[in-house]
Image: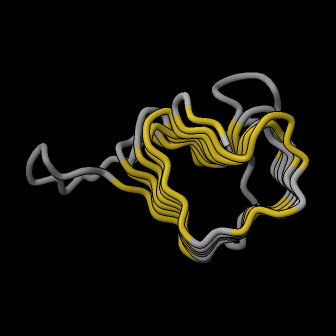
Amino acid sequence: MNKHGSLPAACLRGRVKNKRKRNENEKAFLVFDSDTFIGNKGDNVIYTYSELTVKNSIFDSNIKNETGGNNSIIEGQEKRNTIFNTKFNNNQSPRNLILGIGNDVVVSNCSFVDNVSYDIVNSANLSVSNSSVYNHQGTVAFYASNQLTLLSDTIESCKLEARVIQSGNCRI
């Protein structure tokens, strides 16, 4: 459910097109600001091929099913996805809470509390700053296949099967 009305899971799926595009270098983008997503079940809550920004929002008690896609609460397939000042509480996903396929994900000033997922964020290049993770259950907290940057983060009381972070072949 979105604070602006009731929305079924995966209703925010698809490609956002910028109809006023002046040239091919301009990108379509999707922005969520001060939105609340509570109790969605089934497919992805947000899935987009557009550049994605989520800020000042709350994701609470969303459950991603185990079929279809990459099993993420938020999935962005554009070059850059930014998650800022957002709370993730009591969400469940068989794979990732946030997935950036072959791209950059920037997470800043976010909190992740009591979530269950294989990993919290999975991306090619990942930057996490001023964020906190508490009581996460899964295998890896943060995974980047290429480059991972952590700055002033707190990771506490997690039940991880393998490691806190992994970047390429480096595991910590």
What is the residue that sits farthest to the left in this orientation?
Answer: 23
Q: Is residue 13 left or right of residue 103?
A: right
- Say which quarter of the image contains residue 5: bottom right
Closest to the observer: 142 or 41?
142
Q: Position of residue 50 (x, y in %)?
A: 39, 46
What colour scheme governs how the chains and residues are painted in the rendered image of this protein? secondary structure
Q: Position of residue 129 (x, y in %)?
A: 54, 68
Q: Quadrant of the C terminus?
A: top right
Q: Residue at x 36, y 55 (%)?
A: 29
Closest to the observer: 60 or 43?
60
Closest to the observer: 20 or 94?
94
Q: Residue at x 50, y 43 (%)?
A: 76
- Against 172, residue 60 (above or below) is below
Q: Quadrant of the N terminus?
A: bottom right
Q: Residue at x 64, y 36 (%)?
A: 171
Q: Position of residue 113 (x, y in %)?
A: 83, 64
- Against 23, residue 128 (above or below) is below
From this viewpoint, is residue 32 visible?
A: yes
From this viewpoint, is residue 11 visible?
A: no
- Against 142, residue 43 (above or below) is above
- Say which quarter of the image contains residue 2: bottom right
- Numbered-mark total: 0
Q: Residue at x 71, y 32 (%)?
A: 71
What is the residue that sits farthest to the top in this orientation?
Answer: 67
Q: Is residue 137 left or right of residue 148?
A: right
